[in-house]
Amino acid sequence: MTPTVVPVSEIDRGIVEAHRDLGAARSAFAQSPSGAAITACQAAEARLNELLDVRFDRMTASPGPPAASAA
């Protein structure tokens, strides 16, 4: 099977959503610190980091534009 290639725009959308989720989890923790809130923060942060790693890997693996000649 050929692996599915996810468009960068979808990765970016996921990053935005994960960042929003992390902000909400941190806000909930700030209002009412608890073990569950810490777990939610850690899960949201892990998801955001995962998506950022995917985005970084995609951008470093993509062939860049042709180098300009040094004239």
Image: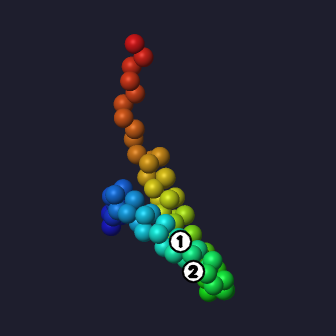
* Residue 20 in the figure: left or right of residue 9: right
Q: Nearer the viewer, residue 6 or 38?
A: 38
Please provide percent x and percent y for residue 49.
55, 64
Q: Residue drawn at (63%, 84%), measured in percent from left and top?
A: 32
The residue identified by callout 2 is 28
Please provide percent x and percent y for residue 1.
33, 67
| Above-or-below relation of 54 to 42 | above
Query: At label 1, which amino acid type do we have?
Result: Leu
Furthest residue toward front:
31
Query: At label 2, which amino acid type do we have?
Result: Ala
* Residue 3 in the figure: left or right of residue 31: left
Q: How is the image coloured?
A: rainbow
- Element class at badge 1: helix
Q: Nearer the viewer, residue 60 or 41?
A: 41
The residue identified by callout 1 is 22
* Residue 26 in the figure: left or right of residue 19: right
Q: Residue drawn at (38%, 24%), measured in percent from left and top?
A: 68
Asked whether residue 63 is in view, the answer is: yes
Please provide percent x and percent y for residue 70.
42, 17
Q: How far apart are marks 1 and 2 (CA)?
A: 10 Å
Q: Residue drawn at (34%, 57%), measured in percent from left and top?
A: 9
| Above-or-below relation of 44 to 60 | below
| Above-or-below relation of 53 to 44 | above
Q: Earlier in the sequence, mark 1 or mark 2?
A: 1
Name the quadrant containing residue 14. Answer: bottom left
User: Mark 1 Cα within 10 Å, few/some/many (few <14, many 20+)?
Assistant: many
